[in-house]
Image (spheres, rainbow, N blue to C red):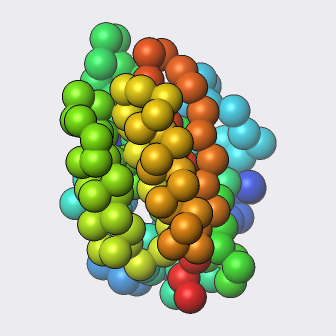
Amino acid sequence: MPYLLTFANTHAAMSAADVLAEAGVAHRVIPRPVQLSGDCGVAVELADDAFDAADSALQSGGLAPVAVYEWSSAGSGEWVRQGGKTNDEGGVLMQETLDCRGMKCPVPVIETKKRLDALAAGELAVLVDQEMQARNVQRAAQAAGYLAETAEGDGHFAVTIRKGSG
């Protein structure tokens, strides 16, 4: 199962499990892996195809994970943090990733606009190869009224764009 949700405490994790069960979302309550930080000793594991349904159910239930991790099978495999922030209503603010590495301008800007148009609310992380591409994506997002920031790392740039629910 490729997604893992962690919560502030055991009560919140178990409440989330109850909400997911009631909504018919496939999940498992498991011990929090030791490599992940947190005060709560349990986590909720989701299948890839259950992610959107879990997001909707948790938002409806007023529950938000502290963090959302996705399993990366690169190398020996590890949990990679994907999100876990909350929106203004306290619901889950999920993050998607758009990999535009290897694309030439203006394709990253065009693909970002398409993905943002399809995203109801949440964060979109756009990966690009060049600093100028990152600046262009960030400027286009800000011109459209979104919050955007750029970080550099591991030979690429990541522009994180936040789209509210309104």
Closer to the camera, 12 or 149? 149
Quadrant placement of the C terminus: bottom right
Quarter-of-image position of residue 91: bottom right
In the rendered image, residue 106, in percent from the top left (x then y), is placed at: 28, 47
In the rendered image, residue 26, in percent from the top left (x then y), is placed at: 29, 64
| Residue in view at x 54 percent, y 31 percent | 33
Quadrant placement of the N terminus: top left
| Left or right of 61, for residue 87 | right
| Residue in view at x 71 percent, y 46 percent | 40
Quarter-of-image position of residue 90: bottom right
| Residue in view at x 74 percent, y 55 percent | 8
Closer to the camera, 44 or 142? 142
| Left or right of 161, for residue 20 | left
Q: Is residue 30 visible?
A: no
Q: How many marks?
A: 0
Q: Is residue 137 above or below residue 76?
A: below
In the rendered image, residue 76, in percent from the top left (x then y), is placed at: 34, 11
Q: Is residue 149 visible?
A: yes
In the rendered image, residue 133, in percent from the top left (x then y), is placed at: 41, 38
| Residue in view at x 22 percent, y 60 percent | 49
| Left or right of 78, for residue 36 | right
